[in-house]
Image (cartoon, coloured by chain):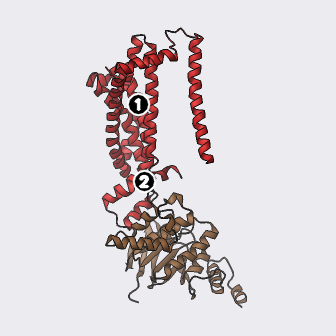
Amino acid sequence: MNAEMTSSKVTLIQTLVLAAVVLIWWLLSLLKVFPESVFPSPVAVAKGFGEEVVNGRLGEDLVASLFRVTTGFALAVVSGIPVGLWLGHHTRARAVSLPAINFFRNLSPLAWIPFAILWFGIGDLPTIFLIFMAAFFPTVITTIAAVAGIPSVYFRVARDYGFSDKDMLTRVTLPAIAPQVITSLRVTAGLSWLVVVAAEMIAGRAGLGFAIWDARNGLRMDLLVCGMIVIGLIGVVIDRLLFQLTKIPSIRWGYER
Amino acid sequence: MKGKPLRLVDASLSFGSIVVFHNLSLAVSRGEFVAVVGPSGCGKTTLLNLFSGFLKPLSGSVECAGRLRMVYQNDSLFPWQTAAENISLGLRHLKPQAEQARQLKEMLRLIELEEFADHYPHQLSGGMRQRVELARALAGDTDILLLDEPFSSLDYLTRLRMRHELSRMLEQPPRTVVLVTHDIEEAAQLADRIIVLSERPARISCEVTVDLKRPRELTHLKVVNAVHRILADLGLEHEENLATRAM
């Protein structure tokens, strides 16, 4: 009862903070701290938002961006986790490849933009490539670290109780690394969402990043802010969705110790 | 003697230049509870690893007859499985499924954790986790149980309680047990025979037998005397005091 009260109180305060942000924004636009042309009011943004929804462009951009992020992110995860698993179990291969993986992980994926355009042109492909480059290396590194960190006693127990090699993978290694890998997915999904906006500004012909760039070129600051808000909200939604994974009973142990 | 479930004959083992055992022999009879104590690093855990077959001796032989299970020093329950799922690992080899379910129920009743069957290890106390761990090892007709300092991470009172718990769990089908421990009281309270190992290379420096039915009281004279004799062998108490105290 008490916990419920506090949690509803927290929600109330969080709403108030958001409202305060909008209020400050509204006040600043009323006081004309910046000219109207470069500082749109909440009202103008709301109107622009309605316009974009009605003409269907917002929906199209949203679908385009989400498609690219999902594809690039999914490719990075389904290839990064197996690579990480293999390197995590093979000490020598890991030692040999770790410097290269670290190099690429620390190289901003945006540095690949020129090559992405030269190799894949404009549209979905270069953006998917950039998201893949952003998400693949962190996924590999986290998986390696998680595998290397599995207490060896689990493997001994598994052997004592007659696990096959397949059981070792599916019933020891994968559940043992799941909590850390899910945390990493949350981080890399956020990273992918950052990258898609930047990539679409330069290499896109649709998508939320392109919409922002297009709004800037057309001096429609209201639409620009509208794009910013949608991008922020979608980022939060993606993180909340992945956060749900941490509530799975067989995974929660990783967050409660 | 033939027909010993666990037997080590003239076993030698070294790690690099460190000689752990040199021609060590030790046999454990069926249904016997043997405790192994000794200075830390003398090779107690290594001895269990030889029995379990995890390590092979460089020379000599190891014989093991029966279903053998080991309980490890650190938390070795799978944290992603519930108490019931963990115990079921020990029943995997049993057919049919119904028999597995029946024995699982029985084990849960034995450790008095029926209500906690669907709890995950992190939701259990240290003592409860240790009970699940013992149940997993004993489940499915285990003949030989190797215990590697199973209670060392528990607080003192829980440890005392777990000794009774273990005695109770071992009551029905008699099992052969080798317990490695640094806790001399624990060894004296539980074991039929206590083996004191020397510094490396480890030899058996003393054997103490305690002829008393389990569960035993910690302060029973035979237990206290056994503790004294072990401490005396380790050079931590004086032998002559025994007579006056035992009188």
SS for tag 1? helix
Identify the mark nearer the N-term, 2 or 1.
2
The amino acid type, in three-letter code, at marker 2 is: Ala
On screen, residue A39 above or below B245? above
Which class describes the residues within 10 Å of circle 2: few (<14), some (14-19), or many (20+)? Answer: many
Instruction: Give the distance between the C-alpha atoms of the residues marked 2 and 1, in whole angstroms.
Output: 27 Å
The residue under the point 50% across, 77% down is B169
Q: Based on the displayed image, in which of its 4 quarters is residue A238 positioned? A: top left
Q: Based on the displayed image, in which of its 4 quarters is residue B199 positioned? A: bottom right
> Could you tell me if residue B16 is visible in this image?
no
Which colour represents chain B? brown
The residue under the point 26% across, 25% down is A120
Badge count: 2
Residue A143 screen position, x and y as percent:
40, 46
The amino acid type, in three-letter code, at marker 1 is: Trp
Residue B120 screen position, x and y as percent:
48, 59
SS for tag 2? helix
Q: For residue A193, which numbered disc appears in the image?
A: 1
The residue under the point 46% across, 48% down is A247
Q: Name the residue under label 2.
A: A176
Chain of the residue where label 2 is placed in the rendered structure: A
Chain with colour red in the figure: A
Residue A46 screen position, x and y as percent:
47, 19
Residue A145 appears left or right of A115: right
Residue B75 screen position, x and y as percent:
50, 62
On screen, residue B103 above or below A51? below
